Structures are given as structure tokens and as C-alpha cells.
Image (cartoon, rainbow, N blue to C red):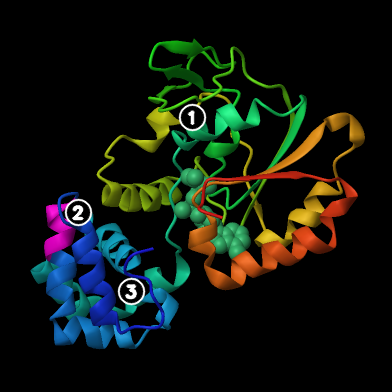
Amino acid sequence: MHGHDLAVSAAENYRAFAEDARGRSPAYECLAGSVAEDAAVLRFLGTLPPEKRQPNLLFAAARYLLGAPADITGLRALIRQNSAELAGVMMARRTQTNEPARCATLLPALAQLPPPLALIEVGASAGLTLLFDRYSYDYAGHQIAGQDPLAPVLRCTPRGPVPLPDRLPAITWRAGLDLSPLDVASDDDVRWLSCLAALASRHAQLRRRAPAGPVPGPVPAPFDLVAAQSTAISEDDGLVTAVAMASLVAAGRGGRNALRTARAARLALCRPRFLSQSGE
Ligand SMILES: C[S@@+](CC[C@H](N)C(=O)[O-])C[C@H]1O[C@@H](n2cnc3c(N)ncnc32)[C@H](O)[C@@H]1O
């Protein structure tokens, strides 16, 4: 993740983040570049633990408090007048997204597995990426109807020989784990997610993309409890499949090692498949 290398200084991280934002987000490129040269903002960041100094966390927390994206002048003023509250938000929150569109890229792989499926998502955020079977899909004209007609249609352009399914796999059981589960029914949690979504230039309202029915709230638990969750599934529930979407990078080395250990030690019990689109 650019801007989150614990081995280098905060200034270097903000410079790397600015470079990465070039061509994608001029506002964040400019803001991160300014922070890298700003002694007062860097001093404020120095009061936080290293893992809490990352640009996307600072920018989302500032936006959350100011009600609008900050520029360097607004950020300096916020730190001068209200550094305790800004630090409080950065300490309490994590960098989180919940992007249903990721279901479209993982669905072809899930559909290759023998049904029915019992799904565990590690790093489930608000639970929206556990709802594979509620969304509808449009893969450049290849359409698959979901169970919830009011849920969004996720569009995706496949490249290469992608095995597109004709129907959605049956999912009989699902659970999400997250260190800090969010609730799509909470205005505050949705506002936090919106502050982070701005980073990726996605301004669509989260609730518009959420299916109409109830969303199963993730369990507050770290990745390594995936073993405990999966032993709660009966054989009739089907093939246990653990999915990770954009969460292994967010978890850092500690979280990834915990998951590896859990996989090696306990998961032989129900022999789950692991599918990841997190680069691991
Ligand atoms: C970038 S978000 C991705 C959320 C969702 N999977 C998606 O694709 O939209 C990563 C999530 O992983 C969670 N997370 C990070 N480290 C974790 C850990 N060690 N155990 C459990 N959850 C973790 C974060 O709280 C966050 O909600």
C-alpha cells in the first residue's frame, strides 16, 4: 500500500502517496505532496503510532471532521485548533472500504467450486462483499440475475478466457470477520466509509449500492479466528470457502502471519478453500 511503509519516514510515505495519486487524484496528489514538506503536520503525525500515520487515514479523518475534503490550509488549521479530536478519530478508526464491485471479479472463481458454499470473509468491513448471490452481474453483455431485484447490477469487463458462470452458486451459510466491523445501518459508519471512498474517486452513496434486505453484520474478530468460525459449520452447509478481498494488504504482516498459522494449524478440520484477490 503506497504511503504505508513502516520502514521509512512519514515525509517519504506522503511523497510516495503523492506519486501514486498522480493522474488519479490531483487533490490528493497535491495534499500529500504538501504534507511531506509541512513541519507542523509532520510533527502532529509524529505523535501517533507509526501504523496510524498513513495518508489515507489522515485525509479520511480530516474529511470526517471537516465535512468536506481538506486542502493543506484546512488541514493545518484543523491540527492547530483540534489536534486531539483528529488524533482520536485516527486512533479509533481503520482504513476501510466495502466495495461490492469486487464480488464481480471473484464470482467466476467461486462458481467453479462444487455447490453449496459456506462463505467466510476475512476483513468483511460492513458485510457487503459477502452478498455475492444478492447482486446481479453484467460481464460485457453476459448477464446473471441475482436474488435481490433491488440490489445493484455489478458491471465488469472480462479479459482473457474467464469462465463466466450462467447462474449464481448456492450459498447456504456466510460469516464475516473484521477487527472493526462496520454497520450499514449506522450513519456514522457509513459516513466513515464515504470519507475513504472519496480517495478512490468513487462518490456513489454506499446505501444506494447496498441490497435492500438485511446485511449480515461481520463478527468483531481478527483473521486467525477464521478457524473457530469454520468449525461452527455443519457438513450439510457445504464447501467452506474463505474469501479475502483487499484485506490482506490492509492487515499488515502481523495479520497475514496470523492467517497463515490458522490455516496451517486448524483448518484441516473442514478443508476450506481459500480465494483471495488481495495479492496473496
Ligand atoms: C480494505 S478493507 C476491504 C473490505 C472488503 N473486503 C471489501 O473488499 O470491500 C480491509 C478490511 O480488513 C479489516 N482487517 C484488517 N486487518 C484485519 C485483521 N487482522 N483481522 C480482521 N480484519 C482485518 C479492516 O478492518 C477492513 O475492514
Q: Position of residue 77 (x, y in %)?
A: 14, 74
Q: Is residue 17 magenta?
A: no
SS type, badge 3: helix
| Left or right for 193, reference 58 | right
Inter-mark Cα distance, 3 to 2: 16 Å
The mark found on residue 85 in the picture is 3
Number of marks in picture = 3
The mark found on residue 78 in the picture is none
Asked if one can make out residue 70 in the rendered structure from this viewpoint, the answer is no
Question: Which residue does the image show at 44% across and 73% down from the upper left?
Answer: 91
Looking at this view, is 183 or 138 the one in front? 138
SS type, badge 1: helix
| Left or right for 136, reference 191 | right
Looking at this view, is 110 or 173 the one in front? 110
Q: Nearer the viewer, mark 3 or mark 2?
A: 2
- Judged from this view, the residue extending furthest toward the left is 73
Question: Which residue does the image show at 89% across and 29% down from the upper left?
Answer: 236
- Judged from this view, the residue extending furthest toward the front is 161
SS type, badge 2: loop
The crowd level at tag 3 (other Cα within 10 Å; few <14, some 14-19, many 20+) is some
Q: Amino acid at mark 3?
A: Glu
Q: Amino acid at mark 1?
A: Ala
Q: Position of residue 34 (x, y in %)?
A: 12, 73
Which residue matches tag 2?
68
Q: Position of residue 14 (x, y in %)?
A: 24, 72
Which residue matches tag 1?
104
